[in-house]
Amino acid sequence: MIRLAAIAALLCVSAAPAFAQDFDVLEGFYSGTSQGSELTATLTHVENGVYSAALSTTVPMKNDVPGCGGSIEGEVVIRDNVGLLTAPNELYDATSTLPAFKAEQCQIKLEFDGEYGLVVTEEEGCSYYHGASCSFSGELLHDAAGI
């Protein structure tokens, strides 16, 4: 009986690392609204400050006025609670004078504010990913904020 209890205890202790997961406070789902748009972000920790990021924005149709929406995904390195998500600007035209076409990259700044806040600021070159009337900018709140 003692031998069985010892084996059971040994199995529990050896299995403990499998149950332990590193908790990452930045990882998770964020959402918010800004100037009539709904904005979401999902961050998944990859390794050593590298995260997989997915952003989505939607402006619903209202009173027969067309809405818009879009999304972007990529990896972002976060250092000191700040990261920059970049992706190629598929509308880039070196000869254009229009802001949507001048930037070679879509750039989106991610700044973590306090324990649950995320401020997303679209820098330039992202119209291809969401259309002219939408933006990836806004203040978001982590879904764990209400727990």
Image (cartoon, rainbow, N blue to C red):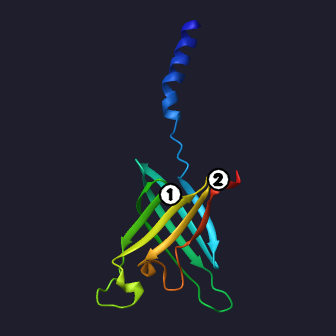
- Residue 62, compared with residue 46, is above or below; it is below
Which mark, by number, is residue 43? 1
Residue 141 in picture, x, y percent from top left: 63, 61
Q: Is residue 101 left or right of residue 25?
A: left
- Residue type marked 2: Ala
Residue under the image location 42 percent in, 65 percent down: 85
Q: Identify the image quadrant of residue 88.
A: bottom left
Q: Identify the image quadrant of residue 138.
A: bottom right
Rendered-image quadrant of the N terminus: top right
Residue under the image location 39 percent in, 90 percent down: 98
Please name whichever residue, 58 or 50, is drawn nearer the observer in this view of the structure: 50
- Residue type marked 1: Leu
* Neighbour tally class for label 2: few under 14, some 14-19, many 20 plus, Cα within 10 Å: few
- Residue 101, compared with residue 13, is above or below; it is below
Q: Identify the image quadrant of residue 32.
A: bottom right
**Judging from the image, what secondary structure is the residue with disc 2 in?**
helix
Q: Is residue 88 left or right of residue 113?
A: left
- Residue 110, compared with residue 4, is above or below; it is below
Which mark, by number, is residue 144? 2
Residue 82 in picture, x, y percent from top left: 47, 59
